[in-house]
């Protein structure tokens, strides 16, 4: 059965006092009246029978309020009044310097198109650069490798003297540049003003020229951020240009991918031409590398508007997207894009905190919704990983999967605030397995890049399962995950999967085979045996929980046993994890700060990546006191307590790509994102708050306001969740660690398909740098002593209330307060 608007029914139901009964009578339900009582989803759920509500937005003078409407007698949550537009708090330039690798241009939430300026940086835009080469359609927020940048378009005046965008690039100043969610504007020193906005599948440009008979728009199909493979441009009529662009690239190369575009101008050309290489042919309608179109702006009308539609399917798909989403004036599209962002941001209302704190928070929330990206056309067609055309039915197909990063934070944030989209994203990943032959690791468009290592797709999908996003598809997902966990992809497939799985299953560890030739494009698990073993073990633990809840007991026992494989790479002689070679001997430099055998990190940083069994890890390290002493050394605790911001910048952060030769916390990379929350399991939860709040000082509201790559919203989601005070401490499961929020109050508007009450309020009255220690926690007014909550708790709760004070308390220090080991 389908929901309205093509959505399938929600997965996990919770009956709460006063809530309407949803679903078919007599079917199995969960009752979660005891916070923390519910752990897994029910094995069988009814399909909802009521019509589902829609979000509505009430606008008053200068105010925006959002709420969810409920049917069947379920009351709507109280609306939280807005006295400002939240989009006005977002600074899209945050992270555009110091290798944050974000982009400032125009897009809508999860849009296929990210229309943004390229200045010469490998991923698009760098704030310190002062010349724009073009405004291109595709950018990935915060990635570290070159990709996208398809079809850079630039307005110019005069004769066409160069076809190299590095030569004809336009100078600009930040004084004439501005950006808001869904809108970008810059005044070029050539005298041309450029404005950008977007729909899901189109980018809309408006150029205001000086009075001239040679107002040009250059469409450069031959130069993108990726590596050129093949291009074609066609001028179809006196308003329309079509292109086909094939490229490859990313970190270590990929198989080619193709994008199709069609650009429709709002007025006819007065002249046109194409180019191949450096040869420009006026009047030509076809070319390989680019096209120019010309307008006369001496008649008083100096603006030119153009809409470019994108498709990863074919030219007909681009034309269909243009018909579906084009044909409107720039200002109308800009307003709709802004409203889409306002509605999305309005699901999180904060009270308290400084202006800077609120700006950085909403900017991170904005970046958390930039990816993954819509991959299907308006008619539902998409190109699968078998390079065949498919049609998405009852869901939207998404693409671009930085899973090694996003499985730790961003996937969880989306499951909380955008569960309908998160559901479709999970189904899209399953489509990759069905159509491409195996689950992905780091997928771009229609290709596997195999960047990063381990098995990130497993906790990504098990988390979706735990959140009820895979209702009706549980066994389908389990089959794909089991195949991935127990095997290795065939040589004919581009995916690496668990490349070292045979040795891992046989011996309990992935071997470290330094210098082993790569068999496929991308990274190799054999080059990072120690960290890969930890990642495989984490994934096995999460899959074991899913297997047990689905009734696959033998599989569950097997995966649970394998989840203890982290012990196989623990070296008692050093007290740290170390890689083992093919013979089983410990290998590499024994110094835990060197990082040999660990991917983008060191043994110091990876030692906490055992979220499935922190009690076991603590015992391995010698007990709570020994673990706390090591944690204190890792975080430079004494110095951090005296100077949180200084320690964060001078001790923890050593450069955006400084992964090795460090024995301290690295808050700018993914390997130890959960590390601050380890104190929740060692009886010192107040230190989690101290470390988290120190790390939050790294987020500022300027171009350098991120540390390291944002990695498709991963670091931004860490910021958002940590600021709210709930964090996924067991990524792939349903456990959320608690730390002091940075705001007095946070109002979350939640989707009632997945959260029956439709809202959750988190409060911490008086929270500040001097009053940040948890004294007590209450869930719906009932005292709560654990340092974590479950997803079941969040579904059944109206409020999560923190009482804070100036000194640590005994809260969360009890014997049963810490997150449980997964068995």
Image (cartoon, rainbow, N blue to C red):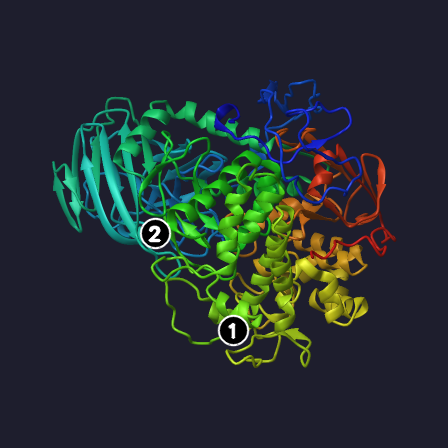
Q: Is residue 104 visible?
A: no
Circle on res. 250: none
Mark found first going from the N terminus, 1 or 2? 2
Apparent side of residue 417 relative to residue 166 in the rendered image (left or right): right
Would you call the spot at circle 2 few (<14 residues within 10 Å), some (14-19), or many (20 or more)?
Answer: many
Give the x, y percent position of residue 445.
38, 46
Of the pair 669 and 486, the residue shown nearer to us: 486
Q: Secondary structure at mark 2?
A: loop
Give the x, y percent position of residue 809.
87, 52
Give the x, y percent position of residue 161.
19, 46
Quarter residue 22 falls in: top right
Of the pair 448 and 309, the residue shown nearer to us: 448
Q: Secondary structure at mark 1?
A: loop
Q: How many marks?
A: 2
Apparent side of residue 362 relative to residue 772 in the rendered image (left or right): left
The image shows residue 319, relative to residue 41, as above or below, that is above
Quarter residue 619 falls in: bottom right
Residue under label 2:
225
Give the x, y percent position of residue 652.
64, 63
Q: Is residue 218 visible?
A: yes
Residue under label 1:
511
The image shows residue 463, relative to residue 176, as above or below, that is below
| Contact? badges 1 and 2 (CB < 8 Å) | no
Closer to us: mark 1 or mark 2?
1
Kindly identify the residue that appears in the image at 47 percent across and 25 percent down.
335
CA distance separating discs 1 and 2: 35 Å
Kindly identify the residue that appears in the image at 59 percent across and 65 percent down.
534
Apparent side of residue 504 relative to residue 74 in the rendered image (left or right): left
Kindly identify the residue that appears in the image at 55 percent across and 49 percent down.
460
């Amino acid at each position: 059965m389908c929901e309205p608007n093509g959505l399938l029914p929600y997965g996990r139901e919770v009956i709460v006092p006063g809530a309407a009964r949803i679903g078919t009578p007599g079917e199995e339900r969960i009752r979660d009246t005891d916070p923390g009582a519910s752990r897994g989803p029910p094995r069988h759920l009814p399909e909802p029978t009521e019509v589902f509500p829609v979000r509505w937005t009430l606008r008053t003078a200068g105010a925006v309020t959002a709420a969810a409407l409920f049917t069947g007698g379920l009351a709507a949550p109280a609306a939280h009044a807005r006295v400002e537009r939240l989009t006005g708090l977002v600074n899209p330039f945050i992270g555009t310097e110091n290798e944050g690798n974000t982009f400032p241009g125009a897009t809508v939430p999860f849009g296929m198109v990210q229309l943004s300026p390229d200045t010469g940086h490998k991923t698009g835009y760098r704030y310190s650069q002062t010349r724009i080469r073009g405004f291109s359609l595709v950018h990935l927020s915060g990635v570290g490798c070159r990709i996208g940048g398809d079809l850079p378009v630039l307005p110019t005046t005069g004769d066409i003297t160069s076809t190299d965008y590095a030569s004809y690039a336009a100078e600009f100043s930040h004084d004439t540049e501005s950006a808001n969610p869904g809108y970008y504007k810059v005044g070029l020193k050539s005298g041309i003003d450029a404005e950008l906005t977007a729909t899901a599948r189109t980018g809309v440009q408006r150029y205001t020229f000086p009075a001239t008979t040679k107002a040009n728009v250059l469409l450069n199909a031959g130069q993108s951020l990726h590596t050129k493979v093949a291009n074609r441009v066609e001028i179809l009529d006196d308003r329309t240009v079509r292109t086909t662009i094939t490229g490859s690239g990313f970190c270590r190369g990929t198989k080619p991918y193709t994008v199709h575009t069609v650009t429709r101008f709002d007025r006819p050309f007065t002249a046109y031409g194409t180019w191949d290489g450096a040869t420009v042919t006026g009047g030509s309608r076809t070319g390989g590398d680019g096209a120019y179109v010309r307008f006369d702006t001496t008649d008083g009308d100096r603006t030119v508007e153009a809409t470019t539609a994108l498709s990863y399917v074919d030219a007909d798909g681009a034309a269909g997207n243009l018909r579906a989403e084009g044909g409107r004036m720039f200002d109308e599209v800009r307003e709709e894009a802004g409203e889409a962002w306002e509605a999305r941001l309005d699901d999180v209302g904060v009270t308290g905190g400084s202006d800077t704190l609120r700006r950085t928070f909403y900017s991170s929330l904005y970046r958390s919704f930039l990816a993954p990206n819509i991959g299907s056309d308006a008619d539902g067609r998409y190109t699968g990983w078998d390079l065949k055309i498919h049609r998405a039915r009852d869901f939207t197909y998404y693409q671009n999967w930085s899973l090694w990063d996003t499985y730790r934070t961003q996937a969880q944030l989306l499951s909380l605030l955008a569960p309908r989209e998160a559901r479709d994203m999970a189904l899209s990943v399953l489509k990759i397995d069905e159509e491409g032959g195996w689950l992905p690791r780091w997928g771009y468009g229609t290709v596997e890049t195999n960047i990063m290592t381990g098995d990130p797709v497993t906790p990504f999908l098990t988390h979706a399962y735990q959140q009820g996003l895979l209702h009706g598809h549980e066994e389908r997902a389990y089959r794909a995950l089991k195949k991935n966990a127990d095997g290795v992809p065939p040589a004919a497939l581009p995916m690496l999967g668990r490349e070292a799985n045979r040795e891992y299953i046989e011996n309990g560890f992935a071997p470290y085979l330094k210098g082993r030739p790569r068999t496929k494009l991308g990274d190799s698990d054999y080059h990072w045996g120690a960290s890969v073993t930890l990642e495989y073990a984490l994934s096995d633990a999460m899959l074991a929980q899913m297997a047990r809840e689905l009734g696959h007991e033998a599989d569950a026992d097997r995966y649970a046993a394998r989840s203890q494989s982290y012990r196989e790479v623990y070296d008692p002689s050093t007290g740290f994890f170390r890689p083992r070679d093919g013979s089983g001997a410990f290998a590499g430099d024994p110094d835990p700060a060197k990082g040999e055998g660990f991917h983008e990190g060191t043994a110091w940083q990876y030692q906490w990546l055992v979220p499935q069994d922190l009690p076991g890890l603590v015992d391995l390290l010698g007990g709570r006191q020994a673990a706390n002493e090591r944690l204190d050394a890792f975080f430079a605790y004494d110095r951090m307590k005296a100077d949180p911001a200084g320690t964060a910048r001078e001790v923890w952060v050593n450069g955006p790509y400084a992964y090795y030769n460090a024995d301290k916390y690295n808050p700018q990379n993914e390997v130890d994102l959960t590390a601050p929350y380890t104190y929740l399991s060692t009886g010192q939860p107040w230190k989690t708050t101290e470390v988290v709040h120190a790390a939050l000082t790294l987020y500022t509201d300027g171009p350098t306001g991120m540390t390291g790559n944002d990695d498709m919203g991963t670091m931004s989601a860490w910021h958002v969740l940590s600021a709210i005070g709930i964090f996924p401490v067991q990524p792939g499961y349903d456990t959320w660690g608690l730390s002091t929020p940075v705001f007095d109050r946070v109002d979350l508007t939640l989707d009632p398909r997945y959260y029956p009450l439709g809202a959750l309020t988190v409060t911490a009255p008086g929270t500040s740098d001097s009053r940040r220690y948890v004294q007590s926690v209450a869930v719906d007014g009932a005292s709560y002593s654990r340092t974590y909550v479950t997803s079941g708790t969040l579904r059944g709760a109206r409020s999560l209330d923190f009482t804070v004070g100036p000194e640590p308390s005994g809260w969360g220090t009890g014997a049963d307060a810490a997150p449980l080991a997964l068995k």
